[in-house]
Image (tube, rainbow, N blue to C red):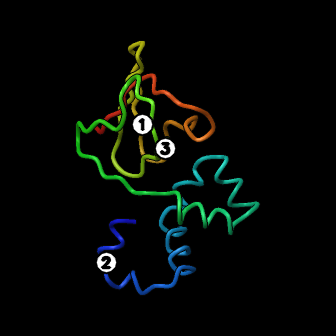
Amino acid sequence: CKQEAAVELLTSVSEPLRREIHFEMFGHMLTTHHFFRHLADVSPALMKQVCHVAVERMQLSKGDVLFSEGEVPQHPHMYFVSRGAMQYKHHMGQRHRLHVGTWASEGALWTTWMHHGSMFAK
């Protein structure tokens, strides 16, 4: 993680300990989703690895666009709201507010994905 590289002390922490730290940081958020909750139950070691290598924090300011309608992400992501709120506007006009504990773009993990709406920080 880029932010962690800036913290000199963390560079001296062992890889297994960093894996545990990442699990403590991100595991509770991911397990709000049924798939990741099941993964944590059946394979805690794999869930720790997912938290260690596949989760990245992103900070947005009010009005920042996370993704736009028609965008085909080169590196697809699933997004979890961990603080604040997000607004999703579907191309057909429906609006949905996402709060802490919700997620978006799950399909991007399983298939080729194109966004059919836009998401921005509230």
Mark toward the viewer: 1 or 2: 2
Q: CA distance from mark 1 to mark 2?
A: 31 Å
Q: Position of residue 34 (x, y in %)?
A: 66, 46
Q: Position of residue 15 (x, y in %)?
A: 53, 79
Would you say 93 lies left or right of 42 here?
left
Q: Is residue 76 left or right of residue 58?
A: right
Badge 1 marks a residue whose secondary structure is: strand
Quarter of the image with the C terminus in it? top left
Amino acid type for the residue under numbered disc 3: His
Location of residue 14 with respect to 64 vertically, above or below: below
Q: CA distance from mark 2 to mark 3?
A: 26 Å
Q: Which residue position is annotated with label 3?
A: 77
Q: Going by the image, does 98 lie left or right of 3?
A: right
Mark with earlier residue (2, 3) = 2
Please, what secondary structure does the residue beneath circle 3 have?
loop
Q: Which residue is mark 1?
A: 98
| Residue 33 position within the rendered picture, expressed as x and y whole percent measured from the top left | 60, 47
* Circle 2/circle 3 CB separation < 8 Å: no
Residue 112 versus residue 51: which sits nearer the camera?
A: 112
Residue at (23%, 41%) from the top-left corner?
A: 62
Tell me where residue 43 sits by quadrant. Answer: bottom right
Q: Residues within 10 Å of mark 1 (few under 14, many from 20)?
A: some
Quadrant of the image for the N terminus? bottom left
Please tell me how many numbered marks the rendered image carries: 3
- The residue at 34%/38% (across/down) is 66
- Lower sequence index among marks 1 and 2: 2
Tag of residue 7:
2
Residue visible at 31% across and 78% down? 7
**In this view of the protein, which residue sits in the foreground, 106 or 62?**
106
Separation (CA) of disc 1 from disc 3: 16 Å
